[in-house]
Amino acid sequence: MTTQAVPSFCLAGRDFALVIEADAAGMPVWRHVGARVMGAALPWRLADAMPPASFSLDARPALSPVPTFGTGWFGSPALLAHRDGGDFAQGFDACHFEWVDKPGHLRLTLTDSVAQIRLEQDVRLDPACDVAKLSARLINTGDSSLDVQWLASGTIPLPSTGDSEAMRVRYPIGRHNHEWAMQDEPLGKGIWSRENRRGLTSHDAFPGAIVMMPGGTAQSGPCFSAQLAWSGNHAQSIGWCDEGFHVWQSGMLLAPGEGRLAPGETLETPEWWLTFSREGSDGAAQNFHGAVRGAMRWPQGGMKPRPVHINSWEGFYFDHDEARLKRLADDAARLGVERFVLDDGWFHRRNDDRAGLGDWWPDAAKYPAGLGPLADHVRGLGMEFGLWVEPEMVNPDSDLYRAHPDWALQISGRAPITARNQLVLDLANPQVSDYLFERLDALLRDLPIAYLKWDHNRDLAHAAGPDGRARYRRQVAAVYRLLDRLIDAHPHVEIEACAGGGGRIDAGIVQRSHRFWTSDCIDATARIAMQRGFLGFMPPEIMGAHVGASPAHATGRAHDMAWRCAVALPGHFGVEMNPATLSADERTVLADWIAFYKAQRSRLHAGRVWCGDAGDGLAWQAHGDDDDLLLIVYRLSPTCQRMPPPVRLPMLDKDAQYDVQLIRETGSPGYGQPDAPAFAAMRATPLAVAGDYLAQIGLAIPMMHAESAAIYAIRRRAA
Ligand code: DGJ
């Protein structure tokens, strides 16, 4: 056993640490990923604590941050590559450890002199939010081409617990109109894996997951969470390793041939964001909210209060009539709306979803004088003007396609595969991206546009360039470049990322956008679970949340106005319907909630978010900090108890006193339900309640109808 100090590298944050050891051969091995440890003084080498196991290699490898294939590691490798069938096995023979920025950014430069590759693995940790970012860069140093099948952004061990059944993985599945349906499963001893080949992030396989460690809950206990900052094909897996722990890995998924590297060429992965919290899944979510907030680029360098939207889509669809849309603007302004977004249907020959994509100029029949008069009308009412675009797409029935049929991604000899009657443009072709830049740039220069809703309404198939080779990966990089170029040219413009609702929500596109359209399903009751799934990875201020029509277009379910407003409240609030169809009473209720949102948005969007379930059909969500909270209690289904369960708020300071006031309920107080004196008292004036009472015994909840909300303000009392 070695007696000298074990060389190691520790990245430590608030609660999270990652430790890499240099083994006896100078190669990196993971020593720890998880709860914070103080620095890197290791008492023994990992190898010295690995008892020989029968039927094992004489030198059994430990888990490297970059495990390779064919040289002794039998688990999932971070790299799969070959040279015309040869060099299929990689094993690094040298590693240079370098602090690019001590102690937050470590780079491992690994070389394999036999397979002739160099691989740089970066590990960064932002201690302010406890989010690590792992990424890899592979360089072909040989003199023939190297075919890469798989290059993980990162590979980590999860701490060994001895009880893998008690470790649970939570992850979203879904579809268009029903995103963020969270699943919860024990990890067990197999491989949990998720893959996406739809060419964009996808509605069904968000590139992230949460791992609840034994004892972890929503508000307490150990929890890991990760997400890939990438808007294309991806894969992630958590596999049991018979050394006694799980290995988590994530990266972009390469189509056949996409990873071919000519001599000297480099393949770079997206960043894999990873966090750990002792404060449960809400703590991990909070870390991600911090990382996303830190990575976003806002006009003027900072986020302004999120303006209330009106969006024309569900109220008008393709039926654009300038006079009616001006009336929409008038009605919206009266309600207190601050930004008017003209959705699909405004451009050349766009009367339905069969034609027009690609021809990005106003339709002369609908807008004889262009969009200027409508935009000026909107601005004259004191609102910002926003416009919908779907730049990556083309309809075969468009002037653009007729002039440049070769600009669409396609495979020669195969009939094009359309979806929503559209094809995908080959953005990696500079002529295509220049055309799109010029069209969008002209719109942004000619019109007072403050906001673009950037949509993407189909999955990618036949994603080949003219050389017949797959271009999924290059497409994503080209979209990022186009967005970056537009943002550089028009830094005052905010961008909403939409892909048929939530098909492109990820930490890659968020670095070049300012809002997500969470889902095309605006049914308030269905939205609650979706929003909570979203908030596990993204902050509330970028969660597009609209008050839609009743019945909801996506589900046919009817809801009263106040319920729809209460559900949209915590996100970036908007309205998506024609207010002219509302009764005077409904308009009053909507205007009142818009005013309430404006009064609360700084609290809703600046601090933390906690999400819990009290049982018996009650879900709660708290926004703010433990000094000043807005608590929204949603009753989803009818109670089967004579007295509803209390809502426990474990994040509150148990030694503090709080003022608790019931400030808003959907419907009138009591809402036709039997009332009780405590609620009447809490409505009238703030009630002093001890923090430990609220944390351990819980806040009393009034009798509520199904699909109604109660909102409390909870403030720490000055000592
Ligand atoms: C899908 C989006 O999610 C909708 O909000 C709307 O913009 C339509 N596309 C327009 O075609």
Image (cartoon, rainbow, N blue to C red):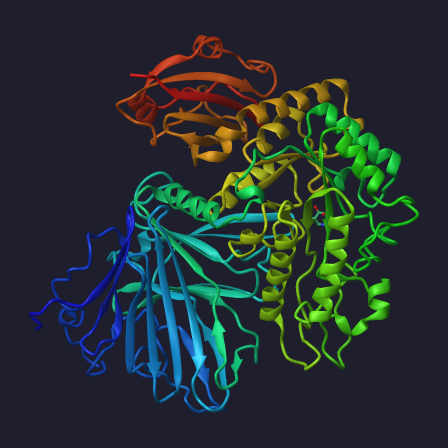
Residue 306, given in percent of the width and then of the height, sits at 59, 35
Up/down of 629 relative to 72, above or below? above
Badge count: 0
Q: Name the residue: 88% across, 39% down.
A: 321
Whether residue 137 can be seen here: yes
Foreground: 171 or 496?
Answer: 496
Residue 287, given in percent of the width and then of the height, sits at 39, 45
Residue 473, given in percent of the width and then of the height, sits at 58, 69
Up/down of 238 relative to 186, above or below? below
Residue 3, given in percent of the width and then of the height, sits at 6, 70
Q: Name the residue: 31% across, 81% down.
A: 92
- Quarter of the figure with the C terminus: top left
Q: Name the residue: 45% across, 47% down.
A: 294
Foreground: 466 or 250?
Answer: 466
Q: Name the residue: 52% across, 28% down.
A: 635
Up/down of 204 relative to 692, above or below? below
Write down the quadrant of residue 358 in the picture: bottom right
Write down the quadrant of residue 585 in the picture: top right
- Quarter of the figure with the N terminus: bottom left
